[in-house]
């Protein structure tokens, strides 16, 4: 090429457009439509009970207690029939670790009171005990899973898992923790007792169908999660009061969609309980059952207490009347020894014998509670009466002395049995 030759400029390719249809400069491209929010179901039965929600969509506390479940599945009927028997070894082990956790919890309370946190070793042990307790209850009473729980306290692949994240605590909240536990403790008691009553029917249904109905599964899972959070709060593994007994709110669709498709495990885990209306009604039923049962027991106990009080008053009146007769017999015997003679003494013996017979008749007509047995007391009264009547017909001093010894022995038994009976009646009242 010659030095003075100018190279040709490369031609710029531009799309042909009709006049007036030129593309505006730097026009941004339209954003793609967001994907649908992912939903994880729990086959083979029931409606969806778990939704994916990122912590960014609904932020939780750093010390939030997370309880995760496998979904409701079929269960082997023979394990359902023998569930409580199969769980006996776990009941013994749970009792031992619970006693140990109680002792560690007391020490942890003092430590948290001064340092505003539970020492790491204690927190790990208490967390493991809370998780093990949840697994035993899920397997035994609640029929949430057919998988036999491991005896190990540490984390393992099981149908129910508990994750705690102990952190900084407020010293005042630690000091007043027993008081702060009262509201959640009452709610845990109400739903827990009612759940156990309702599971009598749930156990039969599971035995027949081979699975726990999904609404009942959801309700039981909500009760277990709430009770587990209550236990974690009691052990100071979290500063968050137990919550979400009635389930979690539905996932925000926009927030879930913006996060894209999550990486789900091969076996979906339920970390968010969105309860159905049927499950919520069952939770209300649990509370009503507890109130009805315990209210009935209180009413029955009150009526029984009133009856026992009345019976005890009648017993006391009869015993007072007998005591007056015994004191009068002593005075009469002294008078007869001075001036009345043997006939006077025999009459005094018969009068006291009649008093003992009258006492036995009155006590026999009193309606005592079933746990109070007045028959030994009545038998002692008849023995005293029999000995006094033999004293009343004794013709020699030797016969009178022998009958008097029998009377004294019977009277000692009578006094002891009356004291025991009165004590039991007073405690029953």
Image: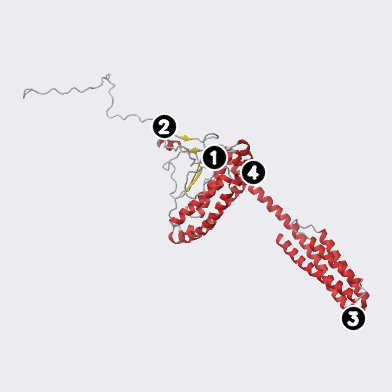
Q: Are marks 1 and 4 in contact (CB under 8 Å)?
A: no
Query: How far apart are the two marked residues, 4 and 3, measured between alpha carbons?
Result: 76 Å
In this orientation, which residue lies closer to the viewer: 20 or 33? 33
Circle number at residue 259: none
Q: Are marks 2 and 1 in contact (CB under 8 Å)?
A: no
At 39% from the left edge and 30% from the top edge, which residue is drawn? 33
Q: Quadrant of residue 354?
A: bottom right
Of residues 91 and 276, the one drawn nearer to the viewer in this rendering = 91
Which mark is in front, 1 or 3? Answer: 3
- Residue 119 visible, this orientation: yes
**For this view, does 71 lie left or right of residue 7?**
right
Q: Which mark is residue 275?
A: 1
Q: Quadrant of the N terminus?
A: top left
CA distance for labels 2 and 1: 25 Å
The residue pinned by badge 4 equals 200
* Residue 391 % position (x, y): 89, 71
Per the model, the C-alpha gap separating discs 2 and 4 is 45 Å
Q: Position of residue 275 (x, y in %)?
A: 54, 40
Tag nearer the camera, 2 or 4: 4
The structure residue drawn at horizontal position 87% and vertical position 70%, both measured from the top left corner, is 388
> Which residue is label 3 attached to?
338
Contact (CB < 8 A) between labels 4 and 3?
no
Determine crowd level at label 2: few under 14, some 14-19, many 20+ residues with C-alpha closer than 10 A.
Answer: few
Q: Earlier in the sequence, mark 4 or mark 3?
A: 4
Compared with residue 40, is residue 138 higher up or lower down, i.e. above or below? below
Give the mark, 2 or 3, whose residue is nearer the N terminus.
2
User: Which element carries disc 1, helix, strand or loop?
Assistant: loop
Can you identify the residue that label 2 sits on? 35
Using the numbered discs, state the Cα–Cα distance from disc 1 to disc 3 in whole angstroms: 92 Å
Residue 120 lies in quadrant: bottom left
N-terminal-most mark, 1 or 3? 1
């Amino acid at each position: 090429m010659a030095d003075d030759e100018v190279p040709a400029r490369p031609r710029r390719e531009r799309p042909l457009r009709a006049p007036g249809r030129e593309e505006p400069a730097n026009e941004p491209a339209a954003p793609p439509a967001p994907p649908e929010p992912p939903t994880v179901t729990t086959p083979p039965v029931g409606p969806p009970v778990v939704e994916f929600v990122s912590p960014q969509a609904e932020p939780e506390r750093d010390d939030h207690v997370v309880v995760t479940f496998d979904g409701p599945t079929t269960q082997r009927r023979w394990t359902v029939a023998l569930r409580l028997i199969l769980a006996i070894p776990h009941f013994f082990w749970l009792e031992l670790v619970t006693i140990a956790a109680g002792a560690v919890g007391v020490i942890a309370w003092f430590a948290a009171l001064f340092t505003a946190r539970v020492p790491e070793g204690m927190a790990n042990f208490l967390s493991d005990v809370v998780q093990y307790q949840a697994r035993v209850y899920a397997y035994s009473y609640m029929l949430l899973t057919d998988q036999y729980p491991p005896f190990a306290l540490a984390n393992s692949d099981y149908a129910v898992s508990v994750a705690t994240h102990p952190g900084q605590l407020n010293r005042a909240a630690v000091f007043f923790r027993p008081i702060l536990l009262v509201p959640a403790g009452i709610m845990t008691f109400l739903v827990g007792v009612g759940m156990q009553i309702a599971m009598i029917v749930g156990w039969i249904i599971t035995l027949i169908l081979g699975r726990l109905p999904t609404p009942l599964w959801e309700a039981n899972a909500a009760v277990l999660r709430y009770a587990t959070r209550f236990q974690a709060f009691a052990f100071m593994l979290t500063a968050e009061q137990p919550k979400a007994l009635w389930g979690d709110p539905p996932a925000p669709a926009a927030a879930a969609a913006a996060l894209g498709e999550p990486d789900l495990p091969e076996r979906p885990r339920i970390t968010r309980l969105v309860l159905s209306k049927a499950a919520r009604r069952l939770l209300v039923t649990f509370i009503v059952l507890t109130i009805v049962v315990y209210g009935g027991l209180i009413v029955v106990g009150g009526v029984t207490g009133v009856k026992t009080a009345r019976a005890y008053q009648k017993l006391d009146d009869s015993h007072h009347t007998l005591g007056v007769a015994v004191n009068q017999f002593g005075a009469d015997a002294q008078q007869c020894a001075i001036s009345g003679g043997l006939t006077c003494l025999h009459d005094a013996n018969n009068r006291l014998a009649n008093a003992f017979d009258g006492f036995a008749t009155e006590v026999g007509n009193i309606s005592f509670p079933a746990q109070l047995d007045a028959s030994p007391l009545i038998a002692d009264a008849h023995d005293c009466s029999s000995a006094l009547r033999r004293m009343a017909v004794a013709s020699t001093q030797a016969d009178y002395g022998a009958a008097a010894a029998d009377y004294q022995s019977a009277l000692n038994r009578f006094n002891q049995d009356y004291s025991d009976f009165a004590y039991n009646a007073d405690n029953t009242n």
